[in-house]
Image (cartoon, helix red, strand yellow):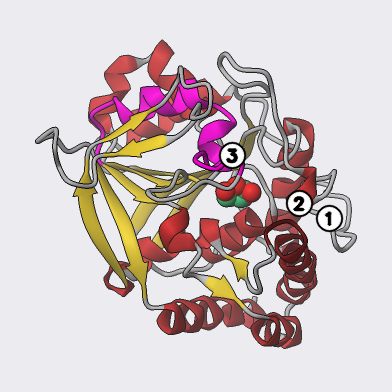
Amino acid sequence: MKKIILDCDPGHDDAVALLFAGISESIDLLGVVAVAGNSYVENTVKNALKITEMASINVPVLKGAGKPILREQIVAPNIHGESGLEGVELPEPSKKYEEENYIHFYKRIIEENERNITIVAVGPLTNIGNLFLIHPELKDKISEIVIMGGGIAFGNTTPVAEFNIYADPEAAKIVFDSGVPLTVFGLDVTHQAKINNEEIRKMQEIKSEVVSKMGVLLEFFHKTYFDVFKIVGAPLHDPCAVIYLSDPEIFEYENYYTQIELNGKYTYGQTVVDYWHLSGKVNSKWAVRVNREKFIEILFENLKKYEKR
Ligand code: BDR
Ligand code: CA
């Protein structure tokens, strides 16, 4: 069982990742830290509380950073709606986020689980960037950071920059330069992990209120992807990062040296991946291919477990 902290900005695909992490037998979810990204942090933390409460995932939920380290804030209403989780009304949570500061939480959990803790980061990397600025000594105590972000060949927010990296490139640079083992799920692979309309309908038939509502939410997400990108099928970006923890063999990987562009007029926020290994260096393992059928099968196998919760 992998001990993880899920750092996220729910977000439709974040919410699916959270449901998976909350039920998979391979994952011991120690906490959820929300970050500003798909929407403002007041919304993303509320969305995390709604999902954890509905799904009876009894873990601490923390409010992370409300602003990127340096750049002005961006959010993604064109994909996730104003609330970050538009498409269906979810009950107001009765639970509150923890009072503990998120940096303190990270430090405490990392020190309690030295070299036995994985951070799964599926939103902008602001929280982890701030953590490493304040506590650089913690870098050596983390076994792995699994990131959904970036792309080898293309972006989705600018032609070359992916949303999570573009929303806080300075934080991303701190994380990519940290020396912590990184596994990255970029757009090249997450766009292979698409869920189609028929599968979304099947999700709605699962006899668990939170999962069937997730199916309705994914209809919204499927539509925004069609409206914005003209693609059919919703890429389940963030679930890739958690399904990797239980079933790493359904993905194929390449090791690369990745730098984050901070100065480019047209390329700010790009993950510059050394595809031909020209630098002779490596700082990241990228997933490059996924067996989509297996991916969907594993996702459904786990979501169905909520029928018994
Ligand atoms: C990433 O940005 C957000 O829209 C999704 O939640 C995902 O983490 C994809 O670029
Ligand atoms: Ca996300």
Q: Residue at x 76, y 60 (%)?
A: 224
Q: Is residue 202 left or right of residue 21?
A: right
**Amino acid under disc 3:** Thr
Q: CA distance from mark 3 to mark 1?
A: 23 Å
> Compared to 262, does 9 lie above or below?
below
Q: Residues within 10 Å of mark 1 (few under 14, many from 20)?
A: some
Q: Position of residue 142 (x, y in %)?
A: 29, 35
Q: Nearer the viewer, mark 2 or mark 3?
A: 3
Marks 2 and 1: in contact by CB < 8 Å?
Answer: yes
Lower position in the chain sequence, tag 3 or tag 1: 1
**Image quadrant of residue 86?**
bottom right
- Where disc 1 sits, the SS reads loop
Magenta region: 157-181
Q: Marks 2/3: CA distance?
A: 17 Å
Question: Can you see residue 241?
Answer: no
Going from N to C along the chain, the mark reached first, 1 or 2, is 2
Query: Can residue 60 be spotted in the picture?
Result: yes
User: Magenta stretch containing residue 229, yes or no?
Assistant: no
How many C-alpha atoms fall within 10 Å of the one at disc 2: few (<14), some, or many (≥20)? many
Residue under pointer 3? 158
Q: Kindly identify which residue carries mark 1.
A: 86
Q: Please state the horizontal and vertical placement of residue 119, each as a whole percent of the image.
A: 40, 42
**Ligand 1 contact, mark 2 (Cβ < 8 Å):** yes
In the image, residue 309 sits, relative to residue 185, either above or below, namely below
Q: Which mark is residue 80?
A: 2
- Could you tell me which residue is drawn at 53 percent across and 21 percent down? 265
Residue nearer the viewer, 245 or 112: 245
Name the spot of residue 283 as percent of width and height, x first: 22, 36
